[in-house]
Image: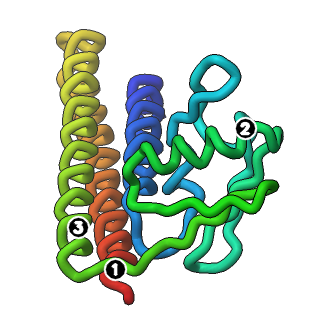
Amino acid sequence: MDPLAQETKKRIEKVLDILKGDLGTIRTGRATPALVENIVINAYAGTARLKVMELATIGILDNKTLIITPFDPSIINEIQKGIEAANAGFTPISDGNLIRISIPPLSQERREELIKAMKHKLENGKVMIRQVRHEAMENIKKEFEGREDDIKRLEKEVQRLIDDTMSTIDSYGSQKEQELMQI
């Protein structure tokens, strides 16, 4: 594979990673650490994300319950306040050592709102991929100026990568929509 195509592939993978993270924040009615790991907590005279290995471990007790175990039990109240302040629709319950969050079921109306938000995130991902394609095509034309055969070959290779990526994004959307519609 040509170095330009490899660079394009790396950039596509970065966009897909961003998109996966974005889609992970959409609540599906199932407990998943992605629902709370980016919540900002005021602790130790500063702010930090709840993400694993910063302030606490985030585990799943069952499909409907998250367990957050702070590394330092003295900040459990700050974590609880941060989750409440995030307005994520969760009610954290503390027992002094850990925090339990029960994930409430989604109403049909809320599911439809989340599907709309998911489609918006997917479209943003596609826009980022189109931008990667545009930049790759410009780089190919600059680098191989006057060598039409090489330009056409590389453009086809990049377009194949883009087409594969777009179908991958569509499959992410289908999968997430199925998760959202599951009761």
| 10 Å crowding of disc 3: few (<14), some (14-19), many (20+) | many
Q: Earlier in the sequence, mark 3 or mark 1?
A: 3
Instruction: Give x and y (percent) for residue 46.
Output: 60, 19
Residue furthest to the bottom in view is 183
Q: Which residue is mark 3?
A: 115
| 10 Å crowding of disc 1: few (<14), some (14-19), many (20+) | few
Residue occupying the point 18% across, 76% down:
109
Q: Which residue is mark 1?
A: 178
Tag in front: 3 or 2: 2
Write down the quadrant of residue 134 in the picture.
top left
Decide which of 183, 40 is in the foreground and name it: 40
Decide which of 156, 163 is in the foreground and name it: 163
Question: On the picture, is 106 further left or further right than 60?
Answer: left
Write down the quadrant of residue 8 in the picture.
top left
Q: CA distance from mark 2 to mark 1?
A: 37 Å
Is 113 above or below relative to 81? below
Question: On the picture, is 99 further left or further right than 87?
Answer: right
User: What kind of colouring is applied to the model shown?
Assistant: rainbow
Write down the quadrant of residue 155 in the picture.
top left
At mark 3, the secondary structure is helix
Residue occupying the point 28% across, 25% down:
136
Q: Which residue is mark 2?
A: 75
Question: Please, what is the three-letter code of the amino acid marked with disc 1?
Answer: Gln
Instruction: Give x and y (percent) for residue 129.
Output: 27, 39
Evaluate whether residue 76 shows in this view.
yes
The quarter of the picture where the C terminus appears is: bottom left
Question: Please, what is the three-letter code of the amino acid marked with disc 2?
Answer: Ile
